[in-house]
Image (cartoon, helix red, strand yellow):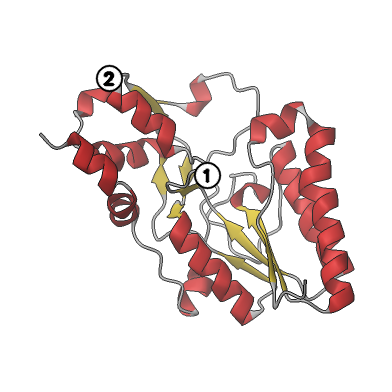
Amino acid sequence: MQPDAVIHAAAQARPHICQTEPQATFAINVEASWNLAGLCADQHIPLVFVSTDLVFDGLSPPYSESDPVSPANHYGEQKVAAERGMRDRYPQVTIGRLPLMFGVVPHAPSFIQPMIQNLQSGKPLQLFKDEFRTPVSGADAARGLLLTLKMRRCVLHLGGPARLSRYEIGQALVRILGFSDSLLAGCFQKDIELTTPRPADVSLDSSSAFSLGYAPHSVSQALSQVLNPHKREQSP
């Protein structure tokens, strides 16, 4: 194969698995990424690496591309190691850091699918009011990665247009699907003992990408597009 370009989006992206299986996930998230960078360098193939907002610790948001990385868990550490090792092997690699994403695809359910299942079964959602991200739909993220490939920027943040808590995302979801607000309950990260460290606020400053033409939809707009089939199911 002689690809015009490579977008490396494969990863074990569930932080709790990276935390409990660091060696196995290091092979996936770091070593495979280094190897791919070397192969692309040998053939001078343009390469975009999909990284994450979890390279930051959540203590000094919002984060721009020039802010120093400071991961809070193994997944973030692995992504930092991948970024650095890939750049060492292939300085021309470009990095697109993505936030929390959502969408509907058969092979990789996002965080909204379990939420929808709970709502449909009448189970209340308990969502953090003190954990913030800049979420974006998978479709908008894909357009951002293509922009990153075109612009050949070293690092580009591809967050959504708004900083939202998990609870606020849940509010949008409940409203769009037509469920009762009574199924939504707020809780606080600081009150729950977590097995995997979770940064409180890794909001991305994506103004550089916005200035280059990246224009992700709002969460409400994107959820409405993604969830049209579910909305029809809820209609009387």
Q: Residues within 10 Å of mark 1 (few under 14, many from 20)?
A: many
Place of residue 124 in the rendered image (x, y in percent of width and height, measured from the top left): 32, 21
Decide which of 44, 73 is in the foreground and name it. Answer: 44
Residue 236 quadrant:
top left
User: What's the residue type where badge 2 is placed?
Assistant: Gly
Give the SS element for disc 2: loop
Q: Earlier in the sequence, mark 2 or mark 1?
A: 2
Point out the residue furthest to the front here: 1
Position above or below: 7 against 58: below
The residue lying at 54 percent from left, 43 percent from top is 107
Label 2 sits on residue:
122
Q: Is label 2 or label 1 in front?
A: 2
Label 1 sits on residue:
201
User: What's the residue type where badge 1 is placed?
Assistant: Asp
Place of residue 48 in the rendered image (x, y in percent of width and height, measured from the top left): 68, 67
The residue lying at 82 percent from left, 73 percent from top is 91
